[in-house]
Image: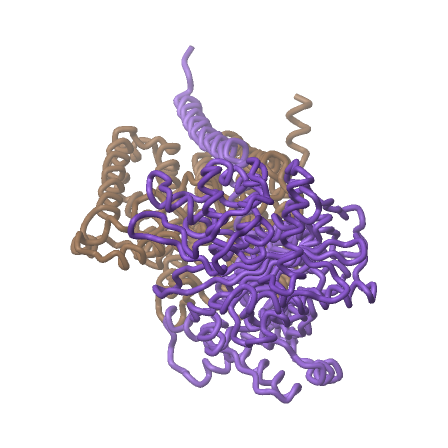
Amino acid sequence: MQATLKQEQGPRLDWPLAAALLGLMIIGMAFIYDVTQAQEGGPSFHTKQGAWYLIGLVAAGAFCVVNYRWIARWSTLGYAFGLLLLIITLIPGIGVVRGGARRWIDLGAFLLQPSEFVKIAFIFALAHFLSRAPEELKNIKNFWLALLLAGPPFLLVLVEPDLGSSLVFIPVTLGMMYAAGIPARFLNRLLGWSGALIFLLLAVTLYAPESWRRYVPIQDYQRQRLMVYFGRDYTADLPETATERERQRARQQQSDDSYSIRQTLISVGSGGFWGKGWGEGTQNTLGFLPRGAAHNDFIFSVIAEEIGFLGGLVVLSLYSLLIYSGTRIACQARDRLGRLIAVGVTIMFFSHVFVNIGMNVRLMPITGLPLPLLSYGGSSVISSLLAAGALQNVSIHRRD
Amino acid sequence: MNENPLEKRQKEERTRAWILFWIMTGGMLVLVCGLFIIQIFLHSRYLELGQSQSYRKVRIPAMRGEIFDRHGEPLAMNLPRYDVTLSLETLHWTRDENGDNLFNREYSQIKELHKAKLIDANRSELGRLARYNAVSNLVSQLGRIVSREIEIEPDDFHEHYSQHLAAPMTIARALDPGEVALFAEHPEKPLGMEIEARPYRVYPKKALAAQTIGYAQRKEDPPMGNYNGKTGLESFYNDKLAGEDGLMTFMVNNFRYRMPEKDVAVVSSIPGQSIYLSLDIHIQQAVEYALTAFRNDTRGAAVVIDADTGDVLALGSVPSYDLNQWYPRMSYEFYKTVLQDSINTPMFNRAMNGRYTPGSIFKILVGLACLQEGIDPSQKIYNPGAYPISDRHDIDDTAPTGYYNFRDAFKWSSNYYFIHFGLEIGLDPILEVIRRFGLKEPRSSNKNWYRGDIANLSIGQGAITVTPLQFAMATAAIANGGTLYEPRILIREKSCDPEIRDTEKWYPPVVKHHLQLNSNHLAVIRDAMLADVEDRDGTGRRASVPGMKIFGKTGTAETYRHGAKDKNTWFASYGLYKDRKYAVVVVVEGGRSGGETCAPIARLIYQELMNHEAQEHFGSW
């Protein structure tokens, strides 16, 4: 009885989660500083990153004040606003193009990447939609409606193009549906179909002649990454009659395209067990890691090079702690809404971590997906902290 | 127990959340495994890959050893040459306040001009152009400083940029002292430029002993290669002279520019050994002078040996050529007169490598063989003027008809006498003496040795050939009483770095073998050789020098050269002055006769040897 009282009295902030977040932010700061110091002449990213952390923490704090149930009531509006932002992003002249993709809106002070925030709005909207009577969830109509909810953001992000971010919607949606109690037969069918679809997509992308590929909504650079990932020989694309020069060019192209992954693997692999020491990594200092990406999408390869397998384990442990806390919060939540929000956010974190670190160890093809709280970037940091704030919100308001 | 349906459902939902948790945990474990494979299993492979792309090794050239004569007069030496080098990495790393380097600025300027939107291919082309322009501007700036037109070829620059980026690029070569001063005193030196003193090979004695010294060459640019001996002793002793290159390892970035302040390791070079030859340039000069004193188009060779040590004091081969003509690049005239001249062949070392039919000088050895076989030197035989080999073939004798003992036959070079006794003792004793004196054993053009072959061999014709150096060593053995030395050309080596003393090494004379000559036989031969020079009717009388005892034998060998009948004329001799014994062998292609052509050349050489000894220039090692 006393224990319960104590629990009731104390703040219901989830401390392990807070610790995991703090640890990640410290590592993030240390390595953003390290990476950008080595790149002479560049702006000092670490102070900006610090600012993002602060803004994100304040935003997350503000997010916790209001009960998630109240927020969920407005989630449809947030979802609609998110879609609007995504549409605006796609308009040439407003959306900012970087590296061939239109993913950002220029806010003057910084570039906003709406897809990062849309994920959270979507999780709330889907959680809101799925927190209805269990009998209704068994109705296939609601299953389709849930999928319909996921469709627009998924497609809008996909056409930016941002394959990595759009793919995150899939495990989040499936996981939340499963957690909500949607009958397994629906989900199995969905899994089967989407698996077949992905298989077909890959097969056509990698092996079909050019005339077929026109009907597949996939960009050339994405196809190249997939070909590199699956180790497909570029020369196989060439007609039988191709000259030796054309073959050489194809091989050269392949070597160029696999440059990033090669350098990433060299970074990670050369780190070994102990790593080369903080600030001692050469892959970034000497500029072999793509300069524009070393501090965001490839930050993990710098970490793995400098603090080695041991450091990698620490990072993975912190994320595991985050996932564990998220799951625990989900289980402690009093209602399905809170549970689904926690599950969705946790899966979102996991997807980012798995895809980003996976591409550093050649488990995943290269996609531009940031590593939550470690990668540099305002949108990513703030949205990650907001998501973590959502988890804390569920934790704090689990009794009222 | 009846469970509350609400609680039941909540429990089920929790279970589902935990199932999702375990799936995610599985994913995390997969990442750990992936990390383990890349970082632990494949660690060494990726470490190596990383090093191979970020480390570069650059050779530190070793100083090449110099070549001196026995008194330390330089024959091949290194002189500094002042080059201006441009460090592209300095250009790369030097940034202005905007963080741009020279290349970036040039690039933006050109881009301004073009305005058009660039595709990647254009961009890289533009980058190339910008780099070249930037460097070309700097180079012309240098030209204005030193008042000399300096240009840089685009192809040279691009090759250097793509192949040797980490090495400084040579942009001006061989500045004269005035230009060096202009550059050094200029207040604003162009970015990245330095004066570098680089050694280059010089042969101060030019054509003297050129074929023996030989020449060394290197790749000039880019980057500078090591000198490599191509001919002569430069080539033969290249391993000693070259030393060992050092190695510098440093880091480069992804543009292949060297990272400043990140020199990783330096293995210093080991300077080459300087070598001191047995040659004496004063004698060498006298020899080359003597060879051309009577006819300046002489083709021939002369060798002077110190008979007591086997030291090669001079190794003259004419015509010769100036060794410095190889640098910096050969002229057309040089190509025509040195490389293409198949008759004069100035690069050919006649003294060492010329194989000539010895003719009558070979009678020294045949005579020795006859004496060893018990021929009585006082026995007289009649020379009818020609030796009949067969019904249809005679060998003429230039010596007058009459009765000959050994001494007369030798000094008048009677063919009849030596054929007669040569045939009497037979082939084997002659071949034996050839072997023992270190000459190349002749092979009969037929399978068997016929009478005519042996007769020809007895007078140094037919199958036998010798090099002047070989015959000089044989003559030296006669002079010193039967010790056949290896010709000693290298006396001493020591590091060309004066700081290094422990690599000094002396090469003592090497005896090939003791011939065990009977002193009576030797006395007979020497007496005959002395008579050849000192008697008023000796064939070698033109070699005589008052005040010196000279023992000689002339020879005029009939031979074919370039398809026509020709002669090799010889004079093989040794001279005694004070306590020294010199063997001097002279050969001239196409001379009149040994006595008329070669004996006077030998006389000039002996005169110089006498003067030289008198002046005590010539110390003993």
Horizontal arrangement in the rendering, residue B326 relative to residue B10 (left or right): right
Residue A127: % across, % down: 40, 42
Chain A appears what colour?
Answer: brown
Please say whether residue B426 is visible from this viewpoint.
yes
In terms of image quadrants, where is residue A315? top right
Horizontal arrangement in the rendering, residue B276 relative to residue A181 (left or right): right
Q: Is residue B269 above or below residue B129?
A: above
Residue A396: % across, % down: 58, 39
Chain B appears what colour?
Answer: purple
Instruction: Name the quadrant of the N terminus of chain B.
Output: top left
Rendered residue at 53%/71% (across/down):
B298
Q: Is residue B266 above or below residue B539?
A: above
In terms of image quadrants, where is residue B204? bottom right
Please say whether residue B214 is visible from this viewpoint.
no
Q: Residue furthest top?
A: B1
Rendered residue at 31%/53% (across/down):
A155
Residue B200: % across, % down: 64, 67
Rendered residue at 58%/54% (across/down):
B408
Q: Nearer the viewer, residue A191 or B601?
A: B601
Coloration mode = by chain
Residue A144: % across, % down: 25, 42
In terms of image quadrants, where is residue B323? bottom right
Rendered residue at 50%/72% (across/down):
B157
Q: Nearer the viewer, residue A395 or A378?
A: A378
